[in-house]
Image (spheres, rainbow, N blue to C red):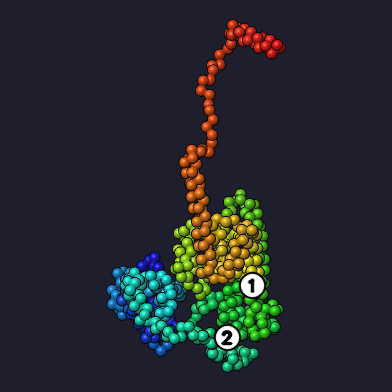
Amino acid sequence: MRVTNILHFTENHRFTVHRSFALSPLDGKMLQSVYQPMIGAMAVGLYYTLYHQVPADKSGFSPLEQQRKLFLAMELEPGEKGRRLFIELSSRLEAVGLLETTRKFIPDGEDYVYEYELQAPLAPDEFFKNQHLLLLLRDKIGKHSVLHLSRELIEPRPEELRDAAEERLSVPFYELFRLNTRIIDYELEQAFQEMAPAKSPGIDTVTGGFQYADIIVRFPKGSRNRAYVESLKYRPDELARINFVAKKYALKLPEVCRLLDEDDLFEEDGTVRFDALQQRANLIYRQERKREEERNRLLARFAELKAAADADGGNAPPKPPEQSEEKPVEMAYYLEVPPLFHGRLDIHQYNTLLRNEPYTYVLQMFFPGGRVPDGVLNIFEKIDLQYGISEEVINAMIHFIHIDRRSWSKTSIEFVASDMLGKQVTTYEQAVSYIREQLAYKEKLAGKNARQSQSAAANGRARGVTKKPNIPIIRDVPDDAPVTEEEFEAIRRKAQKLDRKIER
């Protein structure tokens, strides 16, 4: 918890707790055996204290009360010492992902209210795939204890089933049930929206994008695609794909609704045609870039006209899109952070960004001010839409072009893309292996050339052969003194004798 002024966090401030889960026996064992060694018993005690503020058989928010209740439950002294200890304990819970703290200002009361949102402990499978939490637990209890915990919490699959062929027999929902989606009960939906806990409007915490309610409210009722858009309420996977395209091409909500209203964008079963959606979203993205460039030129001219009045205008750097559900990156496949981002991103943040973010955002990071030349953007657009290379592989390709000091020309980029396609690089892990092989080959080739040059120089010295011949230099340079008359007369007589000899 970041509190700059200790007077803004006291036992007299009010608080509320929000949770949308219930602890199971497995969650209790994870808190006791795994989380407690990392953050301490008092931090886990604070977690349980916050958890029981909401009745065990319910979810949602607890009533507003003074934080004095939490201080008394934790036996903390009211005052600066107790506040600082409470802040430290809550910070430990936040660092391991068990708590999120928000401070809200109420204008009527002119006071702060703290909202504590509890998160469920990770399941054993998810925890042991999380690299930084696993390393922290190893540092606290040791490697052998971590291995013992993993064997105690996770039961392995029977040996007889490991190599057995499998067949999916589960029945999907829409094969067994038929819903009447043509009739929409607005009163029921409004009632559920009022009852549901109000989170940040406009952003879906599951898909990391626009909510279904935001889209359907702005979507035209007479559209041919109205039924398909209404079915998105029961198809979160399709809504997530739409939100990914909106995030990739920085689309606003009206632009998303306009795209979904176009013809030939949905299959007969309601599935979104992803390639068509990307093509049309890319056109909007390019048009917006052109408009932005024109606006920047007009602003630059206006700034020149106002230069006499010292009018200074600046362009804000590109804002990263909202974070969606992240795909983890194993430490064995971490790429080194380039010097360009030292001090800004650590190795975990950089690799998570390469694995999850769209290539349009990653590409902006490698150019000053996020201004990517149109030529470079055209090449990567071709690689994405025509070659069908995945986002994570394109991001790894951008990293490789930068660290290998390759040219950003069309020939250089297409050479790397065609080489990856030919070697069937389709995942982030394969892309990392490809980059390491290329860099290792380059280092091996450089070392081989260095050894050859050293060997050639040694052989030349052994044979006594030098690269340049020794040219003799005149040491006795005559003086530049004038010739006397006697010497000149003697030279003339010698010349006459030579002439007579030649005539004979």
Let me know if residue 41 appears in the view. Answer: yes
Q: Is residue 40 left or right of residue 231?
A: left
Let me know if residue 349 appears in the view. Answer: no
Q: Amino acid type of disc 1?
A: Gln
Q: Secondary structure at mark 1?
A: helix
- Distance (Cα) linking label 1 and label 2: 22 Å
Mark 2 lies on residue: 234
Mark 1 lies on residue: 278
Tell which of 341 and 400 is nearer to you.
400
Tell which of 412 and 81 is nearer to you.
412
Where residue 15 sits: x, y (%)? 39, 77
Q: Residue at x 54, y 36 (%)?
A: 468
Q: Amino acid type of disc 2?
A: Tyr
Q: Residue furthest front?
A: 504
Quadrant of the image containing the C terminus:
top right
Q: Residue at x 52, y 57 (%)?
A: 442
Where residue 212 sits: x, y (%)? 58, 81
